[in-house]
Image (cartoon, helix red, strand yellow):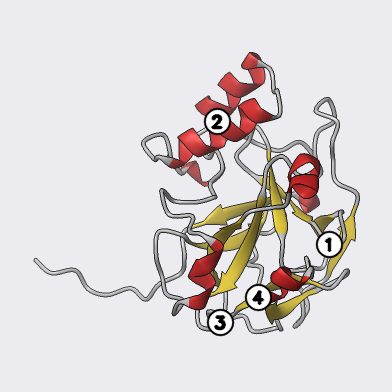
Amino acid sequence: MKQRNGIFGLDLAKSGLVKFVLAKFVEVGLTKAILAKAILTKTILAALIIASGISSAQAAKKQASISNASVTIRTMTTGEFLYAGGKKDDVNWNVVEVPLPGYLSKKYPFGAVQFQHIKQADKCLISNGFWTALGDCAGVANGDHRTLFSLLPTSSGAFQIQSIAAEGCLVAESNFDKKNTQSLKIAPCYNDIRVPIDLHWLWILTPPIIDAKPSSL
């Protein structure tokens, strides 16, 4: 199934994030035509995210809270949230950019991020091969890359989420929203720009879920 442009209609055109994204596109040598198409897509990296706010890895040591770096992660198949440990209430994450050593930065030109748990600042989304859970964010300092993910952008603004530890991409299976625990797998990423990406491979980063309150007059 072909992906559609303008998903959720989020407009990041005025965000400083666009500069970051464009720099990443140029680094990997995408053509000007592809770059222009990506700029025009309103959901360009509806993602890394909502602003100037991708913090450094040191942010994991601080108390996590809703901020400009906070997002939810949704599958393009159903819109279902990605959550860890089967807790559907815990769907908000802080995106933390993690510098990669030279040999990995060449392999993953779009860089790496951790998804830090909002309520537990020292815990991050972790890939255990065929499911997701929570793991120690600090493990990366000891060579444990299971909390590291590379976000592979597309012309629609959606992403493939590549596990750096497993190298494949996170895929939502057909029954993703039918079980108490999510049905996920790691599968080879789509790398050929001529081939439309199956929606099961695609994710979007959207604003965090917060409590609604009456507005003052």
Q: Nearer the viewer, mark 1 or mark 4?
A: 4
Q: CB atoms at circles 2 and 1 under 8 Å apart?
A: no
Q: CB atoms at circles 3 and 2 under 8 Å apart?
A: no
Amino acid tagged 4? Ala
Residue at the image position 88 percent from the left and 70 percent from the top: 130
Of all residues shown, which one is farthest toward the right? 188
On the image, numbered disc 2 is attached to which residue?
Answer: 22
Residue at the image position 43 percent from the left and 54 percent from the top: 53
> Which x, y percent locates residue 5?
60, 34
**What element does badge 3 sit on?**
loop
Residue 89 marker:
3
For the C terminus, the quadrant is bottom left
Q: Is residue 9 visible?
A: yes
Residue at the image position 73 percent from the left and 52 percent from the top: 101
Q: Is residue 88 above or below residue 111?
A: below
Q: Nearer the viewer, mark 4 or mark 3?
A: 4
Tell me the CA gap for discs 1 and 4: 15 Å
Amino acid tagged 1? Ala
Amino acid tagged 3? Asp
Tell me the CA gap for discs 3 and 2: 34 Å
On the image, numbered disc 4 is attached to which residue?
Answer: 138
Q: Is residue 117 left or right of residue 83?
A: left
Tell me the CA gap for discs 3 and 1: 27 Å
**What element does badge 2 sit on?**
helix
On the image, numbered disc 1 is attached to which residue?
Answer: 165
